[in-house]
Amino acid sequence: MMNLTLLSSLGLPEAASKFGETVDPIWDLVLWTSIFFFAIIVGTLILFMIKYRRRAGHVQEKAPTHHTTLELAWSIIPLIVVMVIFVLGAKGFNDTNVAPSNAYVIQVDAKKWTFSFTYPNGGSDPEIWVVKDQPVRLVMTSEDVIHGLYIPAFRAHRNIVPGRINEMWFQATQLGDFNVFCTQYCGNGHSNMTTMVHVRSQKEFDAKLAEMGDLFHKKTGGSVEIVPFVDVGKKLYTQLGCATCHSLDGTRLQGPTWKNLYLYTQELEPGAIQSGGKVAGVEARVPTADEFRDWDTYLNRSIANPAADIVKTYQNIMPGFTSQLDGAPDSQNVLKRRAIIEFIKTLSDRYTPEVLAADPTIPHLPPVSGAAPGTAATPATQPATEGSK
Amino acid sequence: MTAKTIDKPLDNYLTHTRGLASWLFTLDHKRIGLMYLVSVLTAFFVGGIFAMIIRLQLLVPNGLIFNDSKAYTTYNQIFTLHGAVMIFLVLIPGIPGALGNFVLPIMLGAKDVAFPRLNLMSYYLYVIGAIFALMSIILGAVDTGWTFYTPYSSSTDTYVVWMVLGVFILGFSSIFTGLNFIVTIHKLRPPGMTWFRMPLFLWATYATALIQVLATPVLGITLLLLVFERVMHIGIFDSSYGGDPVLFQHFFWFYSHPAVYIMILPAMGIMSEVICTHSRKHIFGYRFIGLSSIGIAVIGFLVWGHHMFVNGESPLLATIFSFLTMLVAIPSAIKVWNWLATLYRGSIVFNTPMLYALSFLFLFPIGGLTGIFLGALATDIQLHDTYFLIAHFHYVMFGGTMIGFLAGLHHWWPKITGRMYNEFWGRIACAFVFAGFNLTFFPQFIMGSHGMPRRYAHYVAEYQPYHVASSIGAFLQLIGFVMVALYLMHSLLKGKKAPANPWGAATLEWTCSSPPPHDNFKTTPTVGDPYDTSNIVFDEATGGYVRTSSPVDQEPVAH
């Protein structure tokens, strides 16, 4: 049993990506070259061990102690062989090193001990979802220590080094679910840091992508869970890069801190669209409905059209977020903007439970149309390493 | 038994002086070598226990011993200690410190090494370094892996500083040994022993010593910087303080790749001695073997970048390192061919040292050839940091270095202890070690090429059959090593007295008694060809071999 398994699996596992076409022939060449030379060495060894074993009537005989031609032969022939292997190996590596320009980009964020994959529509998932035959480029960063991302069936492997952006790519050629391992030792949960890559048809992938892009619904098991606006806002705060200029702890960065922004007076630079050149604070009481709406308008406008109102002492440097955060009412984009506003509100100490209870501007989710798609997204069998994540 | 003719027992290095102080403050290279031997074997025992725990753990996919995520840290500490102990306390000091110290000066016909006090200091630095490493075990063992990669090592809360300082001190021990051997080989060769008349073990030790002296300081500096990074956050290796983690890897491997040649070269030296002696043949291709040692030492300095192929290293750099890595295969191949050619028309005796040497000729090529898979860029990507790599370096480091060490240990055991060991049990044990080793590590090539990553406390169920085979192999090795321990102890107590030259070797250490006298030689010995055994014949009376004529009278043999 065991022996059969050993013999039948001397090669690499079946390739499920285009790299197999490059790597596997080189593997076979090196394997058979090695077997050939090993057979010569061990064959000679065994022959000599039998023929020249010490026994009655056999003594050692005179033999040459050097032979320059022989020495050169067994130096130069292996040298040629390893040089051929070097050239093929380096060519294979360099040919497959750079992703084609039409590759689909997925951001990878590695940290102890999970991977997070973020797709172009802003959705993210702990597993990789790709379309068969489409080149995929992974742009990878690590938050803490060095991790590795290795997909044996794809012949794809790269370390994720903190402080650097490393990239890798692959092109899956087979539908299915394949193991992904962290290969760079990263501490206690290193062997838990495994996930799957799911190769799907374009249709199934699109459905999954729409599900992931919907930040307000989370599918767990069979049921759909609603994600609170505040949680989505908090996620977007880092995902969209707000964190670069807006602190949450009162620190002054390039933009105003979000701490105690809501319901605190905002003096604006001349030329502000906001009437009166400021947004008035509301202290120690529940704001009126007009005041609530006033603040809501101001915040919405400041996100979609930041140049409209500039807070005093700050500069007009914030980019617009129209493509991410503006659109038709109740679209994902607008809901996301609302989520950020809800998050900003919670950072103010004037947003007391009483104020919250009276707030008419709290958004509501539109009814889910067609439920969360993703019959395609049948969770694949996780490896036995599924542990405490 | 010749013991009937009770001569007054000859004075030897073991009986020359008595008492604990005579050992602790000894300047005799033989005693220091023996103390090294005991220490290294103890460390091998400790590292072996860690290995057995690893193999037990991996019997089942979820882990047999440490099977919840809290306990994984303990597993991580165990594999770190296995690696650190085996590499820094066994493989690096093993052959030079223990066998080299004992044999090298006698092979040179010298009374001692050039700097006996430095030699003793080197031993004590080894002990102090080992204590530091041990302290880290008691305080809360390191869980970084033996490679101490930043930023994990600069951020984990285990006692990295103790272990790292231990390794730093061990580095000095290694440098002192190397320095001592270089000077000894340059200055203390007897008249007539030109460079190309040195036994090949000396060539190998010399090449090793060059690496020890030139590469180890880089490790020392790197580890000190790591300590500074941990304690003071100077921002050189840890990206969260503005450092670059890959810089650490470059520094680390600038030492640690040449260090694998520190480990394998002396074993190759032993091979040359053992193969000639136990086939009663002159070495084939003396110059090629000797110079290939230097070749390995030089090229070995230039290949470190192949440890970083998947780090996002520039493709040009990766290509250059892959090229240089391929070159280093050639001197190793030259040695293997020459040893095979040495066996031609010989009279091969299957005693224990020779069985280990023949095992080397089987195992080391597997280690070397699988290195080509890892040196070629396209295939390395698939195999990097998997069990394929684990299997590869165990075939080189165990199948090469440890098997070579065992060959040397049995070859020189009669010289060191003055006693013969039980040949029957020696052969049985060698068979267990050989079979067990292959069963342990061959399946790891397969599971590695199928993607099993290294340093996993638990794993995907598809790899279990290979892990089970591997663990069974480890137990076979354990049985083999228990046998070795038992028959060697038996040999110390009840072994047959060893003749001066039990194997018929021509090198100088076999011309003095077993065990050698305190001063090794009364007069500077006459030097001939170290591999010409044509006038060395078996002597029934002593049970050993004797020379029939002075070595200088012989016709020189062309190399």
Image (cartoon, coloured by chain):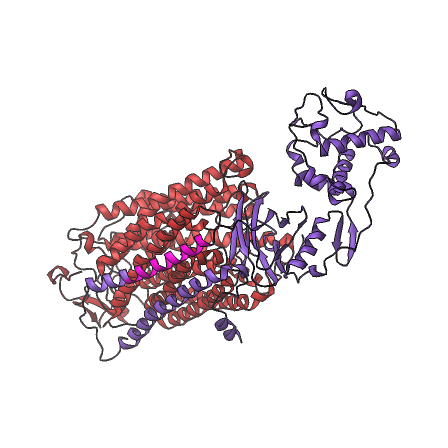
Chain colours: A purple, B red
**Quarter holding residue A246:** top right
- Which x, y percent locates residue A72? 23, 61
Residue B87 visible, this orientation:
yes
- Residue found at the very far front of the displayed protein: A328
In this rendering, would A61 be left or right of B120? left
Q: Which residues are magenta?
A: A77-99
Residue for point 24% across, 48% down: B185
Q: Is residue B141 above or below residue B434?
A: above
Foreground pick, A328 / A173: A328
Confirm whether the magenta stretch covers residue A91: yes
Count of numbered labels shown in the rendering:
0
Is residue A219 highlighted in magenta?
no
Q: Give the percent coordinates (x, y) of residue A82.
A: 34, 59
Our reading of the magenta stretch's main secondary structure is: helix
- B37 left or right, relative to A6: left
Query: Would you place residue B94 above or below residue A16 in this image?
Result: above
Q: Quadrant of the C terminus of chain B?
A: bottom left
Question: Height in image: A294 above or below B148?
Answer: above
Q: Quadrant of residue B352?
A: bottom left
Q: Position of residue B342 (x, y in %)?
A: 25, 67
Foreground residue among B29 and B183 = B183
- Image position of B460 (left or right of B208): right
Q: Nearer the viewer, residue A383 or A358?
A: A358
- Work out which quarter of the rendered image holds the N terminus of chain B and state it: bottom left
Residue B71 in the image: state x and y as whole percent: 62, 54
Rendered residue at 25%/56% (across/down): B290
